[in-house]
Structures are given as structure tokens and as C-alpha cells.
Amino acid sequence: MAKVFVYGTLKKDFPLYHYMQGSKFLESKEVKGLQMYDYGSFPIVWPGNGVVHGELYEVSEETLAVLDRIEGHPRFYERVLVNKDFYVYIKKPDPDYDVLIESGIWETPEYEDVY
């Protein structure tokens, strides 16, 4: 089992949440030291001075492998361990295109599931 912090399309009531089915919801969580960016139809996060709001889940190794696939780890997102406690998927933003979401809250569930 592993803990994973989700902050975008994998959250409850968002388009990719069905991949979290069977995982144990642990808590709503704020993670300091990350900044969220709008990448179009989904968010990305990167280390910085902000706070990102999301949900923490306990997932099986099988679910973690599925999440790695849909998040494109390690080619698109990189899965990193935070505080030796939980994983988060991060991607370096492009300052010319990606817009900072200062609230750290992803509220746009429009996304086409291509998997």
C-alpha cells in the first residue's frame, strides 16, 4: 500500500476519479511547498512557496501502477515522495504558457478521459 496526494482530475467528483475506486480516502489535505499551474484541461504542481489543496488516498500497488500509467510517469509527470509519507505527481511548468493558480485549488472538472 502507498499514499498518494491527488489535486486535479483524480479527485472525487472529477473525471478520472474512477481510477481511485477501491482506494481508501484518508483526508482532505493542504500541502505546503508546492505551487499549482493551469496546464489547460488539468493542473500541474511544482515545488514553490504555495499551498496545494487536494485529497490523500491509500492505494494498492496495482492502483499505483495504473496511476503511473495515466499520469505518464516518469516521462510526463514525475512521481515523488513528499516528507517520506506520500507520493505526488509533479511537472515543471513552462513560464511562457502555464498560469499560476494562486489558490492552489483545481476547480475545473472539464476533461476528456482518453484511457
Image (tube, rainbow, N blue to C red):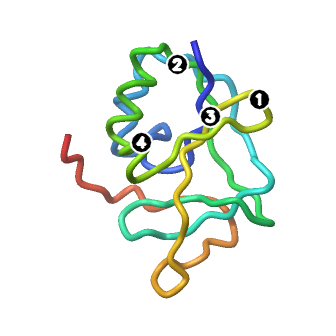
Residue type, label 1: Lys
Q: Quadrant of residue 67?
A: top left
Q: Earlier in the sequence, mark 2 or mark 1?
A: 2
Residue type, label 3: Tyr
Q: Earlier in the sequence, mark 4 or mark 2?
A: 2
| Label at residue 59 | 2
Outermost residue toward the bottom in this view:
96
Q: Earlier in the sequence, mark 4 or mark 3?
A: 4
Q: Residue at x 43, y 41 (%)?
A: 13
| Nearer to us in this view, 18 or 80 | 80
13 displayed left or right of 49: left
Q: Residue at x 41, y 45 (%)?
A: 14
**Secondary structure found at label 1:** loop
Mark 4–mark 3 Cα distance, whole angstroms, equals 12 Å
Mark 1–mark 4 Cα distance, whole angstroms, equals 19 Å
Is label 2 in contact with label 1 (beta carbons under 8 Å)? no
Q: Residue beneath label 3, please?
A: 87
Q: Residue beneath label 4, please?
A: 73
**Secondary structure found at label 4:** loop
Residue type, label 2: Val
Q: Earlier in the sequence, mark 2 or mark 3?
A: 2
Residue type, label 4: His
Q: Residue beneath label 1, please?
A: 84
Outermost residue toward the front in this view:
75
